[in-house]
Image (spheres, helix red, strand yellow):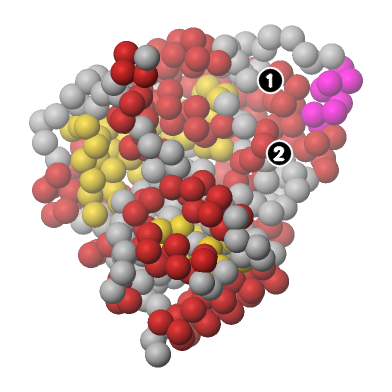
Amino acid sequence: MTELMNKNLLQLKPSGIRRFTALAKSVPDCAMLTIGEPDFSTPAPIKDACKAALDADKTHYPPNTGEPALRAAIAEFEAAQNGLDYTADEIIVTSGATEALYTAITGVLNPGDEVIIPTPAFGLYESIVTMAGAVCVFLGTAPDGFQITPQALSAVMTARTKLIILNSPNNPTGSVCTQESLQAVHDAVAGKPVFILCDDVYARLVYAPCPMFARYRDLRSQILVVQSFSKPYAMTGWRMGYLMGDEPVIRQLALLHAAAVVSVAAFSQDACIQALKTDITPMVETYRRRRDYIWDRITAMGLPAVRPEGAFYIFPRISQFGMSSEEFCTRLITEGKAAGVPGTCFGAEGYVRFSFCYEMPAIARGMDRLEAFLNRLQR
């Protein structure tokens, strides 16, 4: 019966990240640096707010787009933190950033529309665009230091371009889009019927200035912003995020959101209000120390890499070893007992992603084993 199913669904493939993580788990004592999940527990005040909400019997249907108090808190937070002017009515509280991405992408696309995805990129974008019946157009950024140039963008834009997806800081590279990259996108879409989707889920986990495309308020009606509570507040299991955009667009997307999930859990929303008040500086400083350590180790091994300025990933080039990134990662797991994710999972052959959201002993063990593996390859 599968041949009778949605033809777009039948094109989807399982996550490569999960596949290589499963392979690593099958090898005893493998040092895994594959998953992009904070190793911290959710801060106690956030959990306490959820417990209090349950004790107060907040167990009934909330409004589709989220509790007014949470949406107001998000609007206030975004204005203070990022200088954005979204109102509570321009915010949808979603089931994680994943649902926000799905709602935004499927909500603005028609079959045959083209979506520009700068690569390397998180693989979920391609899956959602495929489900919408639209066409992925990949813009390779590796030749330009993982930045977007006017020339490269112009070469892939057509009359069918409907959406450009920006992810800064980027998964998997940890790169932050420069103001020049953002200006290139701004100038390319100004006055054109093109949406810009800003996947900003790592925007609070930065180690350098991080320009934001959503601050171009002259393009307000074209911009959609996705945010998550998962990454900055160590709340991955809560599945809480939000989507922001111009009111007429959000009003329509809210209908899709309601049809898909109705609303997110009522008692979790009080926890999110508390999360927005949480100081995450200690976690960011921990990630910074890990970034410095893994950067020093990777570069000392002679692996070319762009220094991560955000998120918790590093993306060194390994094409010089004369094998595909999938072969490299498979051998690293089975022979070297260390695990990364091949660049093919992000549309970038010849690279490997290592995550540093693990405790330092695990990162050090992974780097020691990577170094020993590379030494054996170079004999």
Question: On the rendered structure, is 312 left or right of 348?
Answer: right
| Disc 2 element | helix
Q: Would residue 195 be visible to someone looking at this image? A: no
Residue position marked by numbered label 2 in the rendering = 275
Label 1 packing within 10 angstroms: few (<14), some (14-19), many (20+) = many
The kind of secondary structure the magenta stretch mainly shows is: helix
- What residue is disc 1 on? 265
- Residue at 16% x, 53% y is 152
Up-down: is 288 above or below 373? above
> Dots 2 and 1: beta carbons under 8 Å?
no
Quadrant occupied by the C terminus: bottom left
Residue farthest bottom in this picture: 379
Which is in the foreground here, disc 2 or disc 1? 1
Bounds of the magenta segment: 49-56
Residue at 75 percent across and 48 percent down: it is: 41
Relative image position of residue 279 (x, y in whole percent): 71, 50
Q: Is residue 372 above or below residue 325?
A: below
Picture coordinates of residue 337, whole percent (x, y)? 57, 69
Does residue 243 lie above or below 334 as drawn? Answer: above
The x, y position of residue 150, in whole percent, is 17, 53
> Which is nearer the eye, 83 or 28?
28
Image quarter (top left, top right, bottom left or bottom right) of the N terminus: top left
Quarter where residue 265 is shown:
top right
Instruction: Give the residue type at disc 2.
Output: Ala
Mark earlier in primary sequence (2, 1)? 1
Horizontal side of residue 45 vs 214, given as left or right: right
CA distance for labels 2 and 1: 16 Å
Residue 55 sits inside the magenta stretch: yes
At horizontal 52% and vertical 18% (from top left) the residue drawn is 89
Residue 325: x and y, percent? Answer: 36, 63
